[in-house]
Image (cartoon, helix red, strand yellow):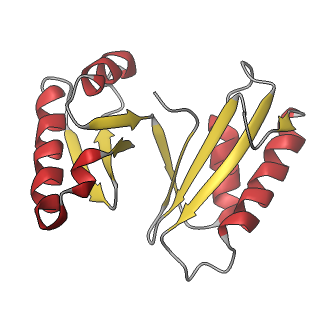
C-alpha cells in the first residue's frame, strides 16, 4: 500500500500524475517478478509475487519520487470474522507494548461504522496479545482500509 501527497493536489491533472507514479513504481520493481498496480483514491495498491524479496522491494519503492510512505499490506474479504482471522495470522507477536487500530471505509454500505470496526478488531488484538491500547502514541499502528470488494490492512508505515 503506497500513499502519496503532492500529486493528489494537482486537480484535473491528478489522474495523469497518478498513472505516472504507477508507471514509476513498476519501473522501480523491474526484474522482481510480476507487478500489478491499482489506483485507489489517494493511494496505490501494488501486488508483488510471493517470491519477491520484501527488503529489496522496500528499498526500491522508497526511492520512487512522489511516494509519501508505504507498508507491506495484506488482503482479506469484507467479512469481519474473516478479517479478524487474517489479522490474527499476520499480527506481530513481539516488538510492541501498545497498539491502535484505525479503519477507513470507502464502503459505507457495510453495517458497522469505522469506530465500531476499530473496537471489534482492537478487542481481538488486546485479548490475543495482552497489549494495551494507546490511541495517541502506539508502538504498533494497525491501519485497515475497508474497500467495496475487499479489506486491506497493514501494521506499520515504512
Classify 71 as above or below 7: above
Position of the C terminus, as image quadrant, is top left
At horizontal 86% and vertical 33% (from top left) the residue drawn is 131
At horizontal 90% and vertical 34% (from top left) the residue drawn is 130
Q: Position of residue 109 (x, y in %)?
A: 56, 83
Classify 139 as above or below 12: above
Q: Position of residue 46 (x, y in %)?
A: 30, 43
Q: Nearer the viewer, residue 100 or 84?
A: 100
At horizontal 79% and vertical 58% (from top left) the residue drawn is 119
Res 121 visible: yes
* Lateral position of residue 77 relative to residue 81, left or right: left
At horizontal 75% and vertical 67% (from top left) the residue drawn is 116
Q: Nearer the viewer, residue 46 or 3?
A: 3
* Lateral position of residue 30 relative to residue 122, left or right: left
* Lateral position of residue 91 relative to residue 5, left or right: right
Label tally:
0
Classify 151 as above or below 139: below
Res 91 visible: no
* Lateral position of residue 53 relative to residue 30, left or right: right
Classify 60 as above or below 143: above
Q: Position of residue 112 (x, y in %)?
A: 69, 75
Position of the N terminus, as image quadrant, is top left
State the image quarter where residue 89 is shown.
Answer: top right
Amino acid at each position: 500500500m503506497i500513499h502519496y501527497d503532492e500529486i493528489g493536489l494537482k486537480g484535473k491533472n491528478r489522474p495523469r500524475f497518478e498513472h505516472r507514479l504507477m508507471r514509476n513504481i513498476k519501473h522501480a520493481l523491474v526484474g522482481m517478478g510480476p507487478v500489478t498496480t491499482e489506483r485507489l483514491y489517494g493511494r496505490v495498491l501494488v501486488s508483488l509475487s510471493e517470491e519477491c524479496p520484501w527488503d529489496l522491494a522496500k528499498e526500491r519503492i522508497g526511492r520512487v519520487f512522489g511516494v509519501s510512505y508505504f507498508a507491506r499490506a495484506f488482503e482479506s474479504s469484507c467479512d469481519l470474522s474473516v478479517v479478524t482471522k487474517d489479522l490474527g495470522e499476520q499480527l506481530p507477536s513481539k516488538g510492541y507494548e501498545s497498539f491502535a487500530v484505525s479503519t477507513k471505509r470507502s464502503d459505507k454500505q457495510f453495517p458497522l461504522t469505522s469506530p465500531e470496526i476499530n473496537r471489534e478488531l482492537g478487542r481481538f488484538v488486546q485479548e490475543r496479545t495482552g497489549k494495551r491500547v494507546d490511541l495517541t502514541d502506539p508502538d504498533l499502528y494497525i491501519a485497515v482500509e475497508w474497500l467495496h470488494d475487499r479489506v486491506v490492512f497493514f501494521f506499520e508505515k515504512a
